[in-house]
Image (cartoon, grey):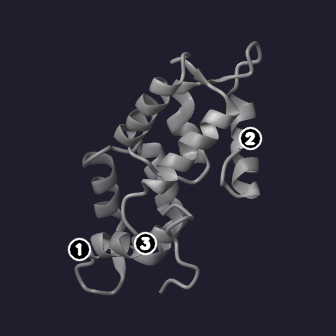
Amino acid sequence: MSSLSDNTQEVLKEIFDLYKNANDGKFCRDQVANAVRAAGLVPTNEEVSRVLGIADDQNSNPISVTFEELCSIYEQLAQNCAGSYEELVDCLKVFDKDSKGKISAVELKQLLTALGEKLPIEMVDELLNELQDNNADVDIFALCDRIAPSSITPHNAH
């Protein structure tokens, strides 16, 4: 079926079962981005759209996907992961003004909700509540560990 680990397939199956239509046992394509993000990837909407476009060429049903197709989509998105863990750390270090490995939670919130693909404020607040310290700073490595797909997170980072 796919080269995904058993654990990843189990996670995807749980997510698929939550979203699938009871009538036809398929999954609405509108939910694919949410599903792969729930499974640990962080693709942009553009990346998801591109992969879905490829899947549409191979599938006569452009509205829904099967579990096997969801696994294939996940696999493609995981392989297209932009950059490495180290590159993510390096990008965030640009905002580390005093070279202590931390970013202001206020500045990070502004970045995540205002630039690029804007994240919902609720999602950012939840992330910051988990990661900010008593000085309202966020450790760069803890942030990267939390947001980087497991496929690029090194086991012995930092």
For badge 1, the amino acid type reads Val
For badge 3, the amino acid type reads Tyr
Write the residue at 50% across / 47% down: 76
Q: Position of residue 94 (x, y in %)?
A: 23, 74
Q: Is residue 67 left or right of residue 106?
A: right
- Secondary structure type for disc 2: helix
**Image quadrant assignment for residue 61:** top right
Q: Is residue 65 above or below residue 34?
A: above
- Find disc 2 in the rendering and name its residue: 13
Q: Position of residue 21 (x, y in %)?
A: 71, 19
Q: Position of residue 30 (x, y in %)?
A: 51, 25
For badge 2, the amino acid type reads Lys
* C-alpha separation, residue under disc 3 versus residue under disc 1: 15 Å
* C-alpha separation, residue under disc 2 versus residue under disc 1: 38 Å
Residue density around tag 1, few if under 14, some if 14–19, many if 20 or more, within 10 Å: few
Q: Is residue 110 left or right of residue 13?
A: left
- Which badge, 3 or 1, is on the more N-terminal residue? 3
Residue density around tag 3, few if under 14, some if 14–19, many if 20 or more, within 10 Å: many
- Find disc 3 in the rendering and name its residue: 85
- Secondary structure type for disc 3: helix
- Which badge, 2 or 3, is on the more N-terminal residue? 2
- Which badge, 2 or 1, is on the more N-terminal residue? 2
- Find disc 1 in the rendering and name its residue: 94
